Amino acid sequence: VFEHLPQAVNHGTNALAREKMHNASTIAGMAFTNAFLGINHCLAHILGATFHVPHGRANSLVMIPVIRYNASLPKKFVAYPKYRVPQAKPRYAEIAATLKLPASTEDQGVQSLIKAVADLKAKVGMPATIKEAGVARADFDKQVKRMAEVAFDDQCVGANPCYPRVKDLVGILWEAYGE
């Protein structure tokens, strides 16, 4: 994806890049079926429904704050933790290492992955924040609590590596907004 998505987007006639992205999309669909989805998708669902943001764009807008949230230690343990010890941070670092990004420590791996995602978004012309996507602050402010509550009830929440509270989702949405 990091190699072929910019080619497919910026050079739409590049058949090889488009084929590679089609294959990546198919593999991702198979992975979703087996591993389910997390808060990135539940936030993208409600962001898209509320502000008419296309689903792929909505996913990209919340991805970096979700990575940060999942890689951090829970601020409060909930009644149904997914693991005795959170596993997202080492897995993000492993993804970074697989992408041949700097990952000599877990923290470095997470930061490298976040930077790579931000760079990829820029290469394909994605807005960096919800604000840059054209959502007015006043409109967002009116909807953010309701969006977090709806997202919390989404079936994808239960598959997230860290079980969030509604206030965590509000915080992630504000970070994604860009203020």
Image (cartoon, helix red, strand yellow):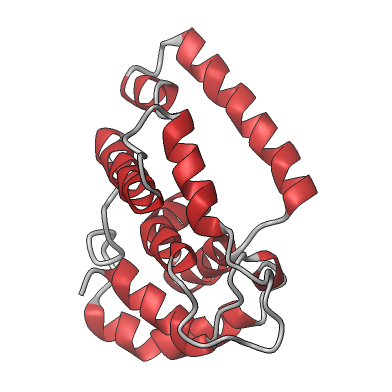
The percent position of residue 174, horizontal first and vertical second, equals 32, 77
Residue at horizontal 51%, vertical 51%?
90
Residue at horizontal 55%, vertical 18%?
20
The image quadrant of residue 62 is bottom left
Quadrant position of the C terminus in the picture: bottom left
Q: Considering depth in this image, is 5 or 105 the residue closer to the camera?
A: 105
The image quadrant of residue 159 is bottom right
Determine whether, in the image, residue 137 is placed left or right of residue 60.
left
Q: Is residue 166 above or below residue 44?
A: below
Q: Considering depth in this image, is 31 or 92 the residue closer to the camera?
A: 92
- The number of numbered discs placed on residues in the rendered structure image is 0
Q: Is residue 133 above or below residue 6?
A: below
The image quadrant of residue 61 is bottom left
Residue at horizontal 71%, vertical 41%?
31
Q: Is residue 46 above or below residue 87?
A: below
Q: Is residue 170 above or below residue 42?
A: below
The percent position of residue 165, horizontal first and vertical second, equals 54, 86
Q: Considering depth in this image, is 139 or 154 the residue closer to the camera?
A: 154
- Find the residue positioned furthest to the right: 34
Q: Considering depth in this image, is 121 or 64 the residue closer to the camera?
A: 64
Determine whether, in the image, residue 37 is placed left or right of residue 89.
right
The percent position of residue 65, horizontal first and vertical second, equals 37, 64
Determine whether, in the image, residue 34 is placed left or right of residue 146.
right
The percent position of residue 172, horizontal first and vertical second, equals 39, 74
Residue at horizontal 31%, vertical 65%?
130
